Image (spheres, helix red, strand yellow):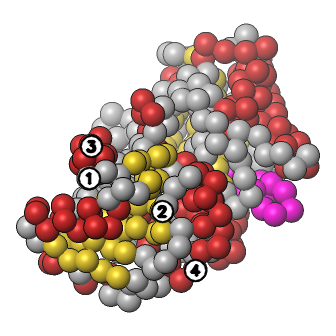
Amino acid sequence: MNALDRLDRPALTAALRELGADGWLLFDFHGVNPVLRQILGLQGMATRRLFVLLPATGEPVAVAHKIELGPLAGFPGRIVAYARWQELEAALRAVVGGKTVAMEVFPEDGVPYLDRVPHGVVQFLERLGTRVVPSAPLVSQFAARWSAADLEDHRAAAEILAEVARAELARTVRLAGTGLRETEVQGRVVEACRGQGLVFDTLPIVGFGPNSANPHYEPAAGSDAVLEAGQVVLLDLWAGRRAGAVFADQTWMGVAAGEPDGEVARVWATVRDARDAAIAAVRAGARAGEPITGAAADGAARAVIEAAGYGEYFVHRTGHSIDHELHGSGPHLDGYETNDQRRLVPGIGFSVEPGVYLPGRFGVRSEVNVHVGESGPEVTPREPQRELVVAS
């Protein structure tokens, strides 16, 4: 394990001092905290409690169960092994007793992606004399940040997804009335992406007509819909070069007609413009040298949809963090489901995916991804969808 060798320790020291913390105490148990795995590069999950202290000064310290020392081979610091609960308590008292540590907690569960450590663990540490503060800025700066290789993986996946989406939608919208089912399209999308070297963690979403109005619809063989003339087609697909790589995540829209009806066209234009408004707000903040918050970016998209009269039908956040998990731990574009006040700082990535969902009728979502580079935000794919895919 050498992931810690790549950690910018001087930057971590500065960030901890700004937080008033003596160290960053990472915790995991049965995979509850992906931040630990991202920072340490550990494979698998801890089936016993694992604590790793990254101090502002001095060597890292791991407190690990005696039967789970294997994954810590090569750990660049001291390992304190325990088996009995009394040994665990004694070890933690010696390592963090009387210290202030940053952990993945968040007041009142305000941002669940930052509230990974069970309350009981915090109580345990407090009894040992440890003060726990939220690690939010550390997560953005160190856990959610993409490497150059991550960005290369993401770009490649993004262009493949866009190519497949355009081709499959163009084919699909011409086949209304032929008995084409949602799962057939889903299968073709998976086959096409895998044929170009991508992998999935879960299957893409294909929704026809009323099903497109369900943001988390999942087609299932035997109950999936058959495409009818005039229906909206939603294709939501995400994949990457390998498991654990930074995936690309996109949503594309079509309509099984030569041209969309008036309301479908209005909703599409509203959603597309909301997507672009969020991106423009992120770019403006980057140019000014003052990155905006995730909540502010959400607000920029939401304002467009509300002005068009569809505000009550936009029922989810504008976007989610993307890191080595598709729904990552970094800042989300969200002032709606949560109030994410983390700034969209260089190095992180996220989706931008506003949507309008008219129950029982149709839904429209447009999704692209953004990586905030040192020179500014980069949108993937290179050519986002501008117009609905229609039958020709």
Q: In which quarter of the image is the C terminus?
A: top right
Q: Which of marks 1 and 3 is nearer the N terminus?
A: 3
Closest to the camera, between mark 4 and mark 1, is: 1
Examine the rendering and report whether any part of residue 322 can be seen: no
The amino acid marked with disc number 3 is Gln
Q: Mark 2 points at which residue?
A: 23
Which residue is labeled 1 in the image?
128
Closest to the observer, 24 or 179: 24
x then y, percent, for residue 210: 51, 23
Q: What residue type is labelled 1?
A: Leu
Q: In which quarter of the image is residue 209?
A: top right
Q: Using the numbered discs, state the Cα–Cα distance from disc 1 to disc 2 in whole angstroms.
A: 16 Å
Q: Mark 3 points at which residue?
A: 123
**Quadrant hosting residue 6:** bottom right
Residue 237 place in picture, x, y as percent: 55, 51
Q: Residue at 18%, 61% (x, y): give it.
A: 89
Residue located at (55% from left, 48% from top): 136
Q: Does the magenta stretch include residue 112?
A: no
Q: Mark 4 points at which residue?
A: 6
Quadrant where the image shows the N terminus: bottom left
